[in-house]
Amino acid sequence: MSDFVNALMLGAGYNAALVGIGAALLGFAAGAAGTFLFLRKRALVSDAVAHATLPGVGIAFIVMVLLGGDGRNLIGLLAGSMLTAWIGLLLVEWMARGTRLAEDAAIGAVLSVFFGAGIVLLTVIQTMSQGRQAGLESFLLGSTAGMLFQDAVVIAIGGTLAVLATYLMRRPMTLVAFDAEYAAASGLNVRRIDLMMMGLVMAVTVIGLKLVGLILIVAMLIIPSVTARFWTERSDRVIWSAGVIGAVSGYVGAAISASAPAMPTGPIIVLVCAALFLASLFFAPARGVAAAVIRHYRFQKRVHWRQGLLAVARGEPIHDPMTLRVLRNQGLLRADGVATDSGRAQAAKIARDEKRWDVAREVHQDAGLTGRYDGLTPIEDVFTRDEIAEFDRIIGGPVAAAGQGAV
């Protein structure tokens, strides 16, 4: 535990601290950039882009070896992966727009072909004398074990630039993600912005290859945005919340990996991100499972409260255990099942409100008003006091004392 706290405080060594900072920047960029694809309902594009990087890694290694290098220069490998990722991206875009193939079919074709080509190239590289110790398989799942200082600097700088690009392009990309037709009517070039959006995702993917790997970078692009969606309805907050979630996942995952060197960094980062997703899924205040269960229980209580009071007003016996419990807990029913004074008053009001709504439907033909009646909405929330007084005049008879509102 002390090693983990030490790593969190950037005390696990200079290189580990740089990896942690780079992972946080990469996580922020991946979360924020991936949000645009998530909102655009094109999350699978990130999968195609990630798998399209693999042949570029192999080609770049072979080219650098043929030019006399050792083939393991990170900038050269990332440049090669960016080239094939961009080609794959353009192929997906062309097939989706220029052929009858659906976008998911185009993504599946590009993903499988490019990944297959990359595996073949990695197999060929293993037969080369320089390729046996190349360590290119780390680009599949990520690895920081053999990361050099220069590699960590490249990731940190790349993550910073990706965050800056996300900030600068956030407005047009948000508009296209939510309403492409309105964006086009506003004079924006939707195709160009789509390519910018996917290009940003491609850049984040390429930067994260060494740290997270091409298989797991997809999770960093999608899970933070899905997690953030549980906490807010506003698009700008979703974007930056996803960035923060990605940054926390990257930083904490890198700290765990640094405190336990045998643990792979990429998978740990994704597991931390998944843990935040599960916590949000269950405990987010507005959209979480726990909140939904609580809302459902409260709705049930309101329904039983109303039905119980209607039974009291009609002089009918109440047998449902939950109805009895709700009314007793509110002091509307005694232990022997007899209504209290407060219970009778509220029952009389509920019964009269039913008559008021009947009159309201006859007086008002506006479905926007009378259509709001669900049996639980207080009539005072829909009509004014003068209107309710007019309903009472039509109904006639004594007006019951006002009781408490619904639970």
Image: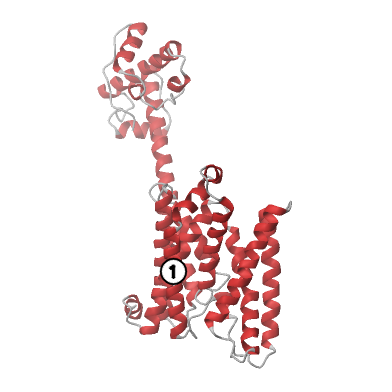
Q: Does residue 250 appear in this view?
A: no
x, y percent for residue 194:
56, 55
Residue 398 locus on image (x, y percent): 29, 9
Which residue is at the front of the view, 6 or 139?
139
Q: Position of residue 71 (x, y in %)?
A: 59, 87
Residue sitting at 36 percent across and 84 percent down? 14
Identity of the residue drawn at 35% across and 35% down:
325
For residue 227, side relative to residue 199 (left or right): left
Colouring rule applied to residues? secondary structure
Q: Nearer the viewer, residue 218 or 391?
A: 218
Considering depth in this image, is 172 or 361 the residue closer to the camera?
Answer: 172
183, above or below 402, in the image: below
What residue do we see at 65% from left, 75% from top? 55
Type of the residue with mark 1: Leu
Q: Residue furthest front?
A: 187
**Residue carrying label 1:** 161
Q: Helix, strand or loop at disc 1? A: helix
Q: Is residue 304 left or right of residue 70?
A: left
Quadrant containing the C terminus in the rendered view = top left
